[in-house]
């Protein structure tokens, strides 16, 4: 009760101190620049990290560093300092300060969406909860840290989290999962040549097989752990490895072999000064193996020497083991009272610091050496064993729940990612289809607009031609005929008068005849092409225009010995319209890249050949469109013939044949 009140009082005093410091710096200190705040944080953090300062002074400096850190603007530097302060609080075993600072660091990291900083904060929480044997919370935070490091593709830190998770699974005796996690971590460490981490992974695998009594495999992995170390190492990991192998041989009751490995470790004379806890463990283990092997009695001194070292170092777990060994030694000498006394002390201390395995070992030994109270000790053993099993089962279930929830979260994240991708593809597909539809509609609209323009131009051209023909015919058949009649009637009149008057009369008749001639010439000119008009040039202009629109090349061949004047105007008009229709079909359907146009004369026949290298079509299955029908209609008006050739992927050819003799019979003027 007193301890609880004392702990609460410390909490209240710590909170009050932080509030006081915060109010002091806000109201009584002048506003400092960001650089000054950063300098103060670093200065106080250095004081907290200095091992020469007292624990109280270091914690006080850490409190001030935390207050200064909160004045820093949100940034990567602030995040780094908060993580450093939180870790130092964990190192100084200030649980309250650690929780508060690490929560602040985690909140700051989430605020800035800093994935690495979030992972670091979870890593700190994992280490904290693992030291308090809260395996469920430790596993959760290590898993979250691993996920963050994985997102940032930091393979080394991710591997360290896999190892920590494997360690927790091993403590919970979930050996299969522990082994799987080790093998997830080990390849990264091997690739990066991280000696210490490789050593730990092989040692963890050895512990798994030792617990499962697979001693051969355990020896194999302990040996791999030793082989992973460089020859000249000062880390004393080799000596710790020898100790592990010695314990494994001891468990197999091969005490002589165990002693050999303990002696190997103890040949390093620096071990006593560098790691006195490991030295105390080694001499105690060697003494215990010598005792069970009934060796010389030099081990008695080592039992007591190890106990004294461990008590001086404050190594309570080691003290418990030493007292159990000394209890067995007293029992072998027949001093049952001393044996019971040391065994009871070992049990009491193990219960106080909640070392279940040592508590059970002490009770088992007490049952053997104190039969009068054996039933009591046995009952305590069963209660403690049941309690330990329940706790272990609960921890294992909690970890399984955390693992299950983490897996569910990851599956939901993957599902959401897949759904987002599918939705994105659908939107892209709809967008592409929409774009294609828009382009198609716009192209169709352009074609329709172009068709309307061409049709209007043709109609206007036709109207102009018809109007010219009408005027020419009116002049020729109407006015010219009337003038001719008037002149003829006038010439038949018998007029009297002087010779001068008759001469003037003849001059007027001659002038009238000249007028008739001029009107006749005008009429003929109206029926011919307008000045500057060139049929061949118009055809080439049309080809050039369509080639640019359809992105194809063309070749034009004209007859050398056929003058434009030899082709009647109506034939030119029909040929031009047919050419337009053919080129329009090529643009819409053929997808051609080249067009040949050839106009030639063979045996009083005019040939027009238009060929493309487009996709062609099947003449038997292809239904005639309006374009082909228009072409045939115009050819019939000229008493001509059409030959159509086409093959799939071979292109299409139009061949038109016109009889030139019929032009002369119908149009003698030409």
Image (tube, rainbow, N blue to C red):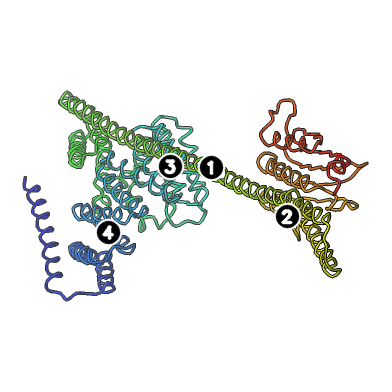
Mark 1 or mark 3: whose residue is earlier in sequence: 3
Between the residue at mark 3 and the residue at mark 4, the CA separation in whole angstroms equals 28 Å
Closer to the camera, 86 or 503?
503
Whether residue 248 sits left or right of residue 550 in the image: it is: left
Whether residue 614 sits left or right of residue 301 in the image: it is: right
SS for callout 4: helix
Residue at horizontal 27%, vertical 65%?
A: 73
State which quadrant residue 530 falls in.
Answer: bottom right
Whether residue 92 sits left or right of residue 646 in the image: it is: left
Residue at the disc numbered 2: 541
Between the residue at mark 3 and the residue at mark 2, the CA separation in whole angstroms equals 89 Å
The percent position of residue 426, horizontal first and vertical second, equals 46, 38
Residue at the disc numbered 1: 441
Residue reaching furthest to the bottom: 30
Q: Quadrant of the N terminus?
A: top left
Task: Note whether 58 is above or below 303 in the view shown.
Answer: below
Residue at the disc numbered 3: 203
The percent position of residue 482, horizontal first and vertical second, equals 75, 51
Which class describes the residues within 10 Å of circle 4: few (<14), some (14-19), or many (20+)? many
Residue at the disc numbered 4: 88
Mark 3 or mark 4: whose residue is earlier in sequence: 4
């Amino acid at each position: 009760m007193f301890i609880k009140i004392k702990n609460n009082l410390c909490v209240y005093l710590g909170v009050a101190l932080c509030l006081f410091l915060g109010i002091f710096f806000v109201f009584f200190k002048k506003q400092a620049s960001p650089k000054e705040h950063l300098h103060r944080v670093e200065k106080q953090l250095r004081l907290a990290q200095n091992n020469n300062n007292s624990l109280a002074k270091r914690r006080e400096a850490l409190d001030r560093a935390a207050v200064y850190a909160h004045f820093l603007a949100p940034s990567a530097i602030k995040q780094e300092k908060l993580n450093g302060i939180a870790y130092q609080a964990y190192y100084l075993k200030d649980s309250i300060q650690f929780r508060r600072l690490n929560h602040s660091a985690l909140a700051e990291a989430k605020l800035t969406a800093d994935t690495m900083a979030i992972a670091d904060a979870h890593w700190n929480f994992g280490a904290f909860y693992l030291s308090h044997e809260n395996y469920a919370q430790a596993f959760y935070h290590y898993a979250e840290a691993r996920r963050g490091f994985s997102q940032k593709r930091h393979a080394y830190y991710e591997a360290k989290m896999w190892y920590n998770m494997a360690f927790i699974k091993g403590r919970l005796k979930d050996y299969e999962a522990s082994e799987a996690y080790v093998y997830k971590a080990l390849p990264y460490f091997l690739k990066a040549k991280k000696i210490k981490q490789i050593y730990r992974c092989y040692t963890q695998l050895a512990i798994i097989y030792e617990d499962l009594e697979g001693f051969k495999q355990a020896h194999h992995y302990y040996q791999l752990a030793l082989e992973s170390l460089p020859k000249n190492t000062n880390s004393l990991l080799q000596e710790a490895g020898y100790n592990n192998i010695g314990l494994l041989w001891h468990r197999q009751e091969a005490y002589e072999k165990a002693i050999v490995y303990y002696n190997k470790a103890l040949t390093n004379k620096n071990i006593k000064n560098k790691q006195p806890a490991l030295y105390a463990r080694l001499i105690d283990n060697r003494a215990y193996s010598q005792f069970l092997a009934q060796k010389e009695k030099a081990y008695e001194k080592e039992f007591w020497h190890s106990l004294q070292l461990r008590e001086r170092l404050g190594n309570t777990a080691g003290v418990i083991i030493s007292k159990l060994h000394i209890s067995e030694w007293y029992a072998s000498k027949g001093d049952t009272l001393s044996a019971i006394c040391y065994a009871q002390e070992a049990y009491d201390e193990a219960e106080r610091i909640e070392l279940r395995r040592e508590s059970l070992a002490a009770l088992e030994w007490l049952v053997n050496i104190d039969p009068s109270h054996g039933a009591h000790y046995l009952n305590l053993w069963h209660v403690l064993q049941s309690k330990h099993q329940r706790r272990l089962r609960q921890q294992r279930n909690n970890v399984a729940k955390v693992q299950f929830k983490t897996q569910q979260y990851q599956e939901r994240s993957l599902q959401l990612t897949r759904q987002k991708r599918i939705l994105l593809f659908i939107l892209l597909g709809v967008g592409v289809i929409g774009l294609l539809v828009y382009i198609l509609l716009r192209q169709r609209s352009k074609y329709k607009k172009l068709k309307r323009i061409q049709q209007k131009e043709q109609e206007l051209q036709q109207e102009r031609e018809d109007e010219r023909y009408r005027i020419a015919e009116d002049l020729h058949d109407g006015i010219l005929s009337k003038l001719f009649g008037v002149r003829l009637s006038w010439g038949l009149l018998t007029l009297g008068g002087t010779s001068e008057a008759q001469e003037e009369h003849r001059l007027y008749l001659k002038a009238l005849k000249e007028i008739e001639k001029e009107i006749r010439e005008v009429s003929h000119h109206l029926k011919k092409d307008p000045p500057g008009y060139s049929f061949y040039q118009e055809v080439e202009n049309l080809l050039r225009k369509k080639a640019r629109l359809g992105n194809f090349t063309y070749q034009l061949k004209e007859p050398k010995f056929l003058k434009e004047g030899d082709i009647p105007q109506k034939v030119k008009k029909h040929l031009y319209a047919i050419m337009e229709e053919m080129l329009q079909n090529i643009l819409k359907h053929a997808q051609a890249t080249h067009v040949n146009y050839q106009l030639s004369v063979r045996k009083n026949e005019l040939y027009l050949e238009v060929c493309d290298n487009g996709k062609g079509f099947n003449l038997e299955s292809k239904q005639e469109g309006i374009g082909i029908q228009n072409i045939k209609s115009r050819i019939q008006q000229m008493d001509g013939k059409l030959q159509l050739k086409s093959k799939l992927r071979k292109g299409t050819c139009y061949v038109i044949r016109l009889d030139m003799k019929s032009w002369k019979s119908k149009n003698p003027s030409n």
